[in-house]
Image (spheres, rainbow, N blue to C red):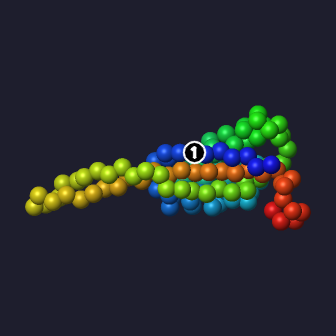
Amino acid sequence: MEIRAVLKKIRVSTRKLNLVATEIRGMSTKFALRYLEVCPKRIAKDVRKLLVSAIANAENNYGIDGYLYVKEAFVGQGLRLKRFVARGRSHANVLEKPFSRLTIKLSDGEDEVWGRR
């Protein structure tokens, strides 16, 4: 069984968010939650909230209470806010403020082939 949770419009670059998402891929949910509690990155707090939401989806929608692990955690690009900053001699530079989206997929391992987690 595959449980999915998506967080959209996160105000951080995809590169920074992918550092945290890479760390929790393949972990059990218990270890991932512990890791995100002590992770020094600012975005780890939001990733932890999404992981708790995915676990709640599994319990509420599918009745899964046992062992879960993070099957996939991938980052996508969201919108970009463009702001203009004045520069010398009547010029302007563009500042891009990126947004990201994070998708976490949990699995209980039933659909997997034995030994291929």
**42 or 83: which is nearer to us?**
83
Query: What count of labels does the image hold?
Result: 1
- 91 relative position to 61: left or right: left
The answer to whether residue 55 shows anywhere in this view is yes
In the picture of the structure, the residue carrying the numbered disc 1 is 7
Which residue sits furthest left? 89
- Residue drawn 66% across and 51% down? 104
Q: In which quarter of the view is residue 112 placed? A: bottom right
Q: Nearer the viewer, residue 2 or 39?
A: 2
Please name whichever residue, 67 or 76, is drawn nearer the observer in this view of the structure: 76
User: Residue placed farthest to the bottom in the image?
Assistant: 116
Task: Look at 83% across and 41% down and name the residue there.
Answer: 64
Label 1 environment density (alpha carbons within 10 Å; few <14, some 14–19, many ≥20)? some
Direction top: furthest residue? 60
* Residue type, label 1: Leu
Above or below residue 13? Residue 115 is below
98 sits to left or right of 116: left
Task: Indicate the secondary structure of the residue bearing disc 1.
Answer: strand
On-image quarter of the C terminus: bottom right
Q: Position of residue 1 (x, y in %)?
A: 80, 49
- 19 up-or-down from 56: above or below: below
Residue plotted at (49% across, 56% down): 77
Give the percent coordinates (x, y) of residue 49.
62, 42
Which quadrant holds residue 26? bottom right
Can residue 42 be seen here? The reply is no
Question: Along the horizontal axis of the image, is 41 left or right of 65?
Answer: left
Q: Position of residue 18 (x, y in %)?
A: 56, 59
Percent across and percent down for residue 58 are 76, 40
